[in-house]
Image (cartoon, rainbow, N blue to C red):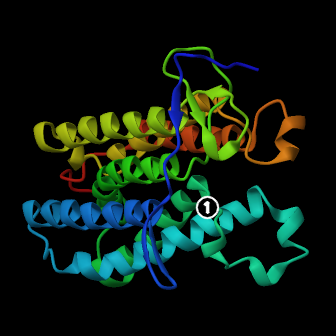
Amino acid sequence: MYSSLAAIVWDVDPEIFSLGPLSVRWYGLSWVLAFVSSIYLVKSFFKKDGVNPELVDSAFMYVFIGTVLGARLGHVFFYGWEYYSKHPGEILAIWQGGLASHGAAVGIILSVWLFSKYVLKKHMFWMLDRVVIAVAIAGTFIRLGNLMNSEIVGSPTDLPWGFIFVALNDGIARHPSQIYEALFSTLLFGALLILYHKTEIKYYRGRLFGLFMALLFTFRFLVEFLKENQEAFEDQLVLNMGQILSIPLVIAGLVLVYLAQDERIKK
């Protein structure tokens, strides 16, 4: 157990304000910012590549539903099945909390596949190569929302930038893992955006998407060593569930980077 006089005491109200029964929370605002910024960015990519940007409004509905359902079902099946198998009526109770980023990744991929096949009429990887740039900056907003909720906390530390989360009521200084992940997401966003605009990587269908997957989930695997397990059963595992789920996604990303072919070459 660590405590430190130099630690940052984090005592932020997760609620911004309330009007009667209506409550506006920082976490909800973070999701709004994530989707608004994503729509703006993807529209700019469509316009740059000569595709009708108005199609992004339709894509938003696909991705929004896919993200939320995927994130929720990922939490249910990967982290809380023992509970939800006995309380199936609460599986879709998203307002109670419980979303998993690995499930969100699967939901985004499936929703983009549906949209690409039936609406956009382009290869799924064409859109995923652009969507993941927006997803990277969206991850920044969502992890900051986790910080405002004092959730997904880090493991104990004696480093001077440790956070004491008052909401946990334990007085322990912890790694601000939410900030680590938010900073990485911002750096990843910047790197992908530069590659998209300044190189020819976007013509290698699936390479940007693969690079995103490999980098994001490699970092996710590593940062889990500095985080508390989300569920008690993970304490019995050599690697926690976040790390186990990250490994196949890293491998898939590396395979895509290696196999990506220039779409300008006529087959």
Q: Residue at x 29, y 78 (%)?
A: 121
What element does badge 1 sit on?
loop
In this picture, residue 204 sits left or right of residue 236: left
- Is 146 in front, or is 192? 146
Foreground pick, 255 / 215: 215
Residue found 12% across the figure and 43% down from its top: 197
Sort mark 1 into few (<14), some (14-19) or many (20+) by Cα contacts within 10 Å: many
| Quadrant of the frame with the N terminus | top right
- Quadrant for the C terminus, please: bottom left
Quarter assignment of residue 227: top right
Task: Name the residue: 11% across, 37% down.
Answer: 198
Q: Quadrant of residue 188?
A: top left
Seen at 73% across and 46% down, the residue is 230
In the rendered image, the vertical position of residue 110 relative to residue 240, given as above or below = below
Could you tell whether 264 is left or right of 98 in the image?
left
The tally of labels here is 1
Q: Is residue 135 above or below residue 43?
A: above
Expressed as whole percent of the image width and height from the top left, the position of residue 51 reads: 13, 71
Tell me which corner region of the image, top left, top right, bottom left or bottom right, holds residue 237: top right
Q: Position of residue 83 (x, y in %)?
A: 87, 66
Q: Position of residue 171 (x, y in %)?
A: 69, 31
Residue picked out by circle 1 = 99
Between 252 and 226, the one lying in front of the other is 226
Residue type at the position of mark 1: Leu
At which x and y percent is residue 22? Answer: 47, 82
